[in-house]
Image (cartoon, rainbow, N blue to C red):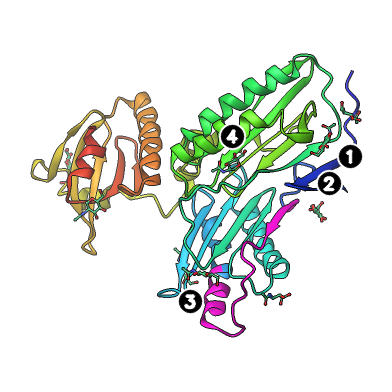
Amino acid sequence: MRRQRSLLPLVLICASSSVLLLTATTNADNLTFYMKADCLDSTNYTRGSAFQANLDAILSSLPAAAAASSSGFAKNITGGAAPDQVYGLAQCRGDISAERCRACLVNSAREVASRCPGRKSAVLIYEGCLLRYSNASFFGEADTSNPLYMCDLDNATQPQFASSLDGLMRSLAEKAYGSPRLFAAGSVDLADYEKIYGMVQCTRDLGPDDCEGCLATNAVSKIQTYKNCSGRQGGRLFNWSCYIRFEVAPFFNAQAAETAMSTGYGGYEEMRGSETLQYDLGTLRAATDNFSEEKMLGKGGFGPVYKGTMQNGQEIAVKRLSTISQQGLVEMKNEIVLVAKLQHKNLVRLLGFCIDEEEKLLVYEFLSNKSLNKILFGA
Ligand SMILES: *[C@@H]1O[C@H](CO)[C@@H](O)[C@H](O)[C@H]1NC(C)=O
Ligand SMILES: *[C@@H]1O[C@H](CO)[C@@H](O)[C@H](O)[C@H]1NC(C)=O
Ligand SMILES: *[C@@H]1O[C@H](CO)[C@@H](O)[C@H](O)[C@H]1NC(C)=O
Ligand SMILES: *[C@@H]1O[C@H](CO)[C@@H](O)[C@H](O)[C@H]1NC(C)=O
Ligand SMILES: *[C@@H]1O[C@H](CO)[C@@H](O)[C@H](O)[C@H]1NC(C)=O
Ligand SMILES: *[C@@H]1O[C@H](CO)[C@@H](O)[C@H](O)[C@H]1NC(C)=O
Ligand SMILES: *[C@@H]1O[C@H](CO)[C@@H](O)[C@H](O)[C@H]1NC(C)=O
Ligand SMILES: *[C@@H]1O[C@H](CO)[C@@H](O)[C@H](O)[C@H]1NC(C)=O
Ligand SMILES: CC(=O)N[C@H]1CO[C@H](CO)[C@@H](O)[C@@H]1O
């Protein structure tokens, strides 16, 4: 029998060379559990400078922007040009609510200012969120620094632990880099009433390939052998680009994680409930001359696509999903997943949708060039 997990487990925190022993609460709910701050550049900005004003602006706007985005992620650039320009990135763990996302990042913004006062570049990682800024662009660039790790002091006792963990983490990594949120979480049965819970994620500015590199090639294959994590029943390995964690107790919201993995767009249910994204059928009829032949741009696997013009002049593309009732919703969900993936590469934006008794419609921004055709009708 494995030992009962204590309420205040000892956690070993190690950064390349320094080794610390800390007593900390690592319970599931502590999203502001502090993992690491790094004042990346020793150079200070000038007090009262334009850089500082831009930094203040970006740090105060990013938490709300990330929380408001359906993927819990935001990046922004303030200031017109170097040297006053500030690049900022904020991201929340894939399974947490907008409210908790915002709270976590507001905390980070405060904490980063006190841990790295005056610095031109810094990053702060909490369990639930990551905040990073710099005077130079780092978007889309994978970080290649050494990973940091934290390990439970308790050792796993089950003989099959290592192979089960390996299988779980590999499958999660594969799911994560194939998903728009670059996030996956799940569990595997270990023995009666025992499971291993795992989570993996990359920062959402990375492309799938860099995410795969960070997760599969590096982190997942290292987690069990990395320094003092060997044989432990829990651990985290992370750098500024990706993060993996495993425990023998649940630490994520399984249902929210499932939703995040399947749509990456904040969840299908969330979309249904979201007022802003919902279009009224009458409005879309009016915009497309009641789906007239003349407005039809073409026909794709899922149904015809019409060009529409909103009352304010905005041009849209409306996809009318074939109404094989039951299947309609499945198609729609697939479509949202597809578009969310494409959205990641900034191709075409899904503006919203309309679900009505007889019609299921997806509304995109209208692009006059080929990429729209490719997306709407398939390659
Ligand atoms: C969360 O963890 C941090 C340690 O990083 C601790 O200071 C804080 O009090 C914890 N919060 C809660 C609610 O347990
Ligand atoms: C930067 O500012 C911090 C805090 O004000 C100070 O401790 C540090 O010495 C400064 N670094 C340089 C290089 O001026
Ligand atoms: C970017 O930052 C500026 C300045 O804080 C803010 O006004 C703007 O709304 C932000 N944009 C996004 C997309 O968050
Ligand atoms: C950012 O700041 C560092 C340190 O002052 C400087 O070396 C670098 O050139 C700056 N980068 C940009 C793009 O301004
Ligand atoms: C776990 O195993 C390591 C190495 O085998 C040992 O040094 C350590 O004391 C063990 N930890 C516990 C809590 O038993
Ligand atoms: C991040 O950490 C991994 C984990 O081992 C390391 O190998 C990698 O070089 C770092 N960066 C990326 C993008 O993988
Ligand atoms: C729109 O077209 C449908 C048939 O496709 C028709 O039943 C409906 O009356 C039309 N509505 C308007 C406002 O023309
Ligand atoms: C053409 O497509 C690219 C993306 O492939 C997009 O960035 C650009 O804005 C499009 N041009 C027009 C005129 O829509
Ligand atoms: C038990 C164990 O693996 N201990 C190692 C922890 O890490 C330090 C520094 O890397 C090693 O010296 C120990 O042998």
Viewer-side label of 4, 2: 4
Cβ(mark 2) to ligand 1 < 8 Å?
Answer: yes
Q: Residue 28, relative to residue 221: is it above or below?
A: below
Q: Which mark, residue 84?
A: 3
Cβ(mark 3) to ligand 4 < 8 Å?
Answer: no
Q: CA distance from mark 4 to mark 3?
A: 35 Å
Secondary structure beneath disc 3? loop
Question: Which residue in the structure is indicated by mark 2?
Answer: 25
Please report the residue visible at 86 percent of the width from the left and 31 percent of the height from the top: 154
Secondary structure beneath disc 2? loop
Cβ(mark 4) to ligand 6 < 8 Å?
Answer: yes
Quadrant in the rendering for residue 103: bottom right
Ligand 6 positioned in quadrant:
top right
Question: Which residue in the structure is indicated by mark 4?
Answer: 218
Q: Is residue 35 magenta?
A: yes
Q: CA distance from mark 1 to mark 3?
A: 46 Å
Q: Is residue 239 left or right of residue 271?
A: right
Which residues, given as a range, are shown in magenta? Answer: 32-58
Q: Residue furthest bottom?
A: 48
Q: Is residue 310 left or right of residue 272?
A: left
Sequence-earlier tag: 2 or 3: 2
Sequence-earlier tag: 4 or 2: 2
- Amino acid, disc 3: Asp
Sequence-earlier tag: 1 or 3: 1
Q: Residue 364, relative to residue 3: is it above or below?
A: below
Q: CA distance from mark 2 to mark 3?
A: 39 Å
Question: Which residue in the structure is indicated by mark 1?
Answer: 7
Question: How far across and how far down the image is residue 107, in percent?
Answer: 69, 62
